[in-house]
Image (cartoon, rainbow, N blue to C red):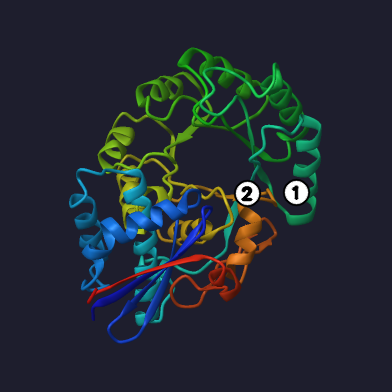
Amino acid sequence: MKITGIETWSRPDVAVVRVTADNGMEGWGQISTYDADISATVLHRKIASLVLGSDPADIDDLADRCVESNLKFPWSYVLRALGGVETAIWDLYGKIRQQPVCELLGGEVKAVPIYGSSMSRSITAEDEIERFTRLRDEKGIKSFKFRVGKEAGRNGDAWPGRTEEMVKGVGSALADSCTMLVDANSCYTPDRAIEVGKMLQDYGISQFEEPCPYWEIEWTAEVTAALNLRVSGGEQDNDLAQWRRIVSIPAVDIIQPDPLYLGGVLRTVRAAQMAAEKGIPCVPHSANLCMVTVFALHIMRAIPNAGPYLEYTIEEGGINQTARQLYSPGLEIVDGRLDMPSSPGWGVEFKKEWLDKADYQVSNADS
C-alpha cells in the first residue's frame, strides 16, 4: 500500500490534513494550532514529496527521513507540518487495522483523569477560585492549573502583585481539596523561580511548570534541584537530542512534550521512552480542545510512564470555540475523567461545514 495524495484545509488558527492510499482508504490528522496556514504551506513544499509513495506502515522511518531531509530548515514549522501528516497516517493505519491508535501503540481504550487548565492571566484570584470550585462540583475535576508570572516575562507579572495574590488566594482556598499546579510560561530567572517556588510550597501547590525560559535547561535544572515540589516542562522542545539532555540532567521531574510541536505521535513516544528510562513521568502537552488533546489522550494510554492526569483547558472561547466546530464527537468530561473515542484511528470525523470554509491545497504522487 502506498500514500498517493495529501490534502490540507487550513485557516490561520488550525489546519486539517487528509492522506489517501492507493486502495482509496483515507486518514485524517491535524497541524498544530496558530499560524497553521503557514505550516500547511510548508507541508506541501517541504514534506509532501517525502511522504507520497511511502508505505503508511513505515511511519517511524518516514518521520526520520522528513526531519533528516530538512536539515537546513530545522524544527518549528517543518515539525508542525510533519505532525499534521504523521497523525493522518496514524488514522489511516488504524482504519486499515480496525483499531484505535492507542491500541496500535500497545495501550487500551480507557478514560483518563484530567486537570482543568486555566489559560488566563487577566483573571483575579477570586474569579479563578469561583470557576475551579464550580468545575470541581459540577464535573468532578480534582486538579487545576493556573498562571503565574508573565509569558517570557523577564521576572515580570501580569500586574504588580498578581502572582502572590493568586498563589495565596487559590492555594488557601483549594489546595486542601484539590491538587493545584501553576504555569510560569518561561517567566523567571533561577533565583526568582526558586523564590516563587518556595511560596508555592508554602501554599500547597504541587507542580511548577516551565519556571524559566525553556531553552535555558540548566536554569530549570537548578530550580528543580532546589525545590520539593514537582517541576515540569518541555512543551516547546522539539529536538530529540535536546530531550536526551533534558532527561539526562535531569532538568525536570515531569516531561510535557507536545505531539504537534514535536512532529507527531512517534517522536512524542520516543521522548516518553527516554524519560521512562530515567524514571520520569510524561504528560503530553494538550492546551486546547482541537485534536492535540485527542492525540495526547491516545498517547497517555499507551506509554508506561504516563503521569497522573492529562491537561484539559477550561477556556471556552478562541481556539476552543473553533474546536467545537472542527470535529465530532466532541470530548466529554465524566467524573473528572476524559472519555476516549473507541472507533478505529482517532475515532473522530472532521466536519464538512468547517472544511468548506478553509483554504484547500493538494499534493499528489503524480503531480
At 36% from the left and 66% from the top, the residue drawn is 106
Badge 1 marks a residue whose secondary structure is helix
Badge 2 marks a residue whose secondary structure is strand
Q: Position of residue 318 (x, y in %)?
A: 65, 50
At 57% from the left and 73% from the top, the residue drawn is 351
The residue lying toward the viewer, choosing from 39 and 21, is: 39
Badge 1 amino acid: Arg
Count of numbered tags: 2
Residue at the far top in the pictured view: 191
User: Which residue position holds label 2?
Assistant: 313
Q: Position of residue 242 (x, y in %)?
A: 29, 36
Q: Position of residue 83 (x, y in %)?
A: 37, 57
The mark that comes first in sequence, 1 or 2, is 1
User: Which residue position holds label 1?
Assistant: 136
At 75% from the left and 50% from the top, the residue drawn is 135
Relative to 186, residue 18 above or below: below
Badge 2 amino acid: Thr
Residue at the far bottom in the pictured view: 23
Relative to 192, residue 238 above or below: below
Residue 61 horizontal side relative to residue 364, left or right: left
Which of the image's four quarters has the C terminus?
bottom left
Res. 357 image quadrant? bottom right
Res. 223 image quadrant? top left
